[in-house]
Image: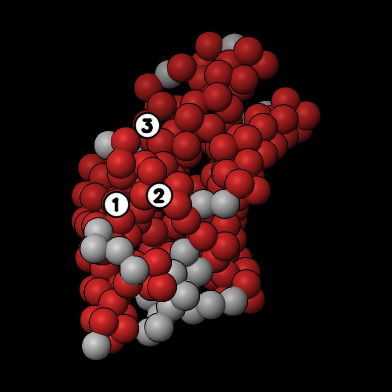
């Protein structure tokens, strides 16, 4: 697993690491304390939207245009025998990191909400809702990245992030359903596998083109 993480960090610059691991978590936690939202579900959706926007915009910095023919990242891949394995590991760890970081941030926000408004946040209903929000955010992120990684430009990421955040806001109508949980789990798992396979197919094609 250490090598897989190192493969991911190859593509993540110092400033980007600071934004991902420090700025975004601190910003969402600080916003939670400052705003003191009265509804935990609405609060969670707001923070999920911040995560969604951050992930899509930052991905344009890290893996932007990776699925394009002749992408710049292929220069490294073509120079290494382990190039394709490195890319596959980087893409996989990227998805795992998004899910784990989202879970940690929403959990922290839930704990802060607990100290602000009492133990009702620990009820099974809210726990299920938070998990659904996390999964829905993850699914929309993966779906959006499956499109934006075919383009190289911040404009595409901005437009895609706006559309994805709008779709997430509609998730308020389904996130409080216990029935939605297993469905979202299946979609998240299938979407992750499909995303990595699609990206690797594109990367491998570019790798072969350069090798020729």
Task: For mark 3, give the secondary structure.
Answer: helix
Q: Position of residue 87 (x, y in %)?
A: 32, 60
Any mark on residue 8, and which?
Answer: 2
Q: Residues within 10 Å of mark 1 (few under 14, many from 20)?
A: some
Toward which corner of the image does residue 211 lie, by quadrant? bottom left
Look at the numbered disc 1 and give the secondary structure of its residue: helix
**Label 3 belongs to which residue?**
128
Q: Position of residue 96 (x, y in %)?
A: 35, 43
Asked if the residues shown at circle 1 and circle 2 are in contact, with their CB atoms under 8 angstroms apart, the answer is yes
Residue 23 location (% of width, % of height): 67, 39
Looking at marks 3 and 2 on the same chain, the residue that comes earlier in the sequence is marked by: 2
**Residue 52 placed where, x, y %?**
54, 53
Residue bearing mark 1: 89
Helix, strand or loop under label 2: helix
Q: Nearer the viewer, residue 157 or 1?
A: 1
Q: What colour scheme does the image use?
A: secondary structure
């Amino acid at each position: 697993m250490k090598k897989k993480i190192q493969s991911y960090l190859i593509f993540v610059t110092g400033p980007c690491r600071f934004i991902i691991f420090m700025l975004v978590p601190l910003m969402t936690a600080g916003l939670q304390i400052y705003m003191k939202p009265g509804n935990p579900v609405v609060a969670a959706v707001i923070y999920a939207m911040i995560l969604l926007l951050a992930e899509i915009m930052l991905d344009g910095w890290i893996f932007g245009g990776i699925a394009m023919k002749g992408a710049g990242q292929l220069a490294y891949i073509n120079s290494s025998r382990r190039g394709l394995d490195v890319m596959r590991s980087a893409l996989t760890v990227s998805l795992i990191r998004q899910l784990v970081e989202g879970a940690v941030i929403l959990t922290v926000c839930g704990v802060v909400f607990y100290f602000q408004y009492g133990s009702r946040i620990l009820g099974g209903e809210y726990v299920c809702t938070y998990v659904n929000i996390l999964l829905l955010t993850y699914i929309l992120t993966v779906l959006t990245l499956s499109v934006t990684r075919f383009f190289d430009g911040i404009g595409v990421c901005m437009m895609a992030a706006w559309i994805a955040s709008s779709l997430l806001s509609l998730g308020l109508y389904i996130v409080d359903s216990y029935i939605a949980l297993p469905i979202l789990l299946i979609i998240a798992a299938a979407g992750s596998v499909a995303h990595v396979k699609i990206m690797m197919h594109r990367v491998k094609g570019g790798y072969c083109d350069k090798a020729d």
